[in-house]
Amino acid sequence: MTGSAVLRVLVADDQFLIRAGLVGLLEVAEGFEVVGEATDGAEAVELAARTRPDVILMDIRMPGMDGIAATERILAGAPPPAPRVLVLTTFDLDEYVYGALKAGASGFLLKDSGPRRLLAAITAVGSGDALFAPTVTRRLVEAFATRAGGEGPCGAARAGAGTLDVLTGREIEVLELVGQGLANAEIAWRLFITEGTVKSHLSRAMTKLGLESRAQAVVTAYESGLVVPGRNT
């Protein structure tokens, strides 16, 4: 988030009514400024570069360039501070959420969420929170990981588990609990440490692994085999 009190938001959704509803809500809410509307991923990339928003509300399924590809391009090319991408999705249908998290999205929100929750999510992401709803992320990642077919991410990606060797024992513990969907307060309670210490361990782990968001940390925990769907509960 920038130093100003107003969050600058770019809305990307190919459905006019949804896009107009989001823009209308943000325009009447205090503390938000809509800096652009994109009807597809390519337009979102162009507008993000031109308007430098704090937060991008990104639909996944759009014609041409989808939300995943757009997120990757925006975050790869953005000078710091990069915008925070909040993906808008439908829980049962969007199997692309996993890819969006890997692309660097900071989190996601269900499209049927109410106005108050939407504004709170944008504020949280814009303020630097790495993930708005870790428990929902856990359910989604587990669902799509088990549907991946073949070995799945927890089997095929075990070859990459060696990357965890750079972490300390405590950092691995924190990463595992993050992967299970626990919030910082819950992790602190589990490990008998402060929330500040949890944040420090997670930050160091993410730096060592080259991760940009808590969402990517969740994905890494699954892909490395540190968290196995249905087993780590």
Image (spheres, grey):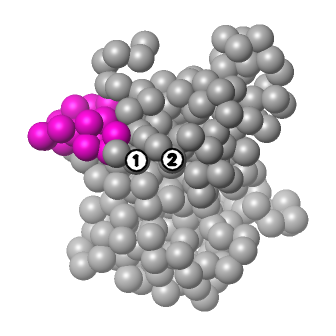
User: Which residue is depicted at the point 29% across and 53% down?
Assistant: 96
Q: Amino acid at mark 2?
A: Thr
Would residue 136 be found to the left or right of residue 178 on screen? left
Mark 2 near mark 1, Cβ–Cβ under 8 Å? yes
Q: Amino acid at mark 1?
A: Gly
Whether residue 4 is visible to the viewer of this picture, yes or no, is yes
Q: Nearer the viewer, residue 4 or 184?
A: 184
Q: Quadrant of the C terminus?
A: top left
Residue 121 at x, y percent in the picture: 60, 44
Report the magenta stretch's main SS.
helix
Secondary-structure class at tag 1 = helix
Magenta stretch contains residue 197: no
Determine the image quadrant of residue 164: top right
**Residue labelled with disc 2:** 163
Residue 99 at x, y percent in the picture: 34, 55
Q: Nearer the viewer, residue 48 or 130?
A: 130
The disc placed on residue 35 is none
Q: Nearer the viewer, residue 175 or 120?
A: 175
User: Which residue is depicted at the point 50% across and 56% down?
Assistant: 105
Q: Quadrant of the N terminus?
A: bottom right
Secondary-structure class at tag 2 = helix
Crowd around label 1: few <14 · some 14–19 · many ≥20 (10 Å): few
Is 187 rendered above or below residue 30? above
Residue 184 at x, y percent in the picture: 69, 27
Is 160 rendered above or below residue 198? below
**Magenta extent:** 140-158
**Residue labelled with disc 1:** 160
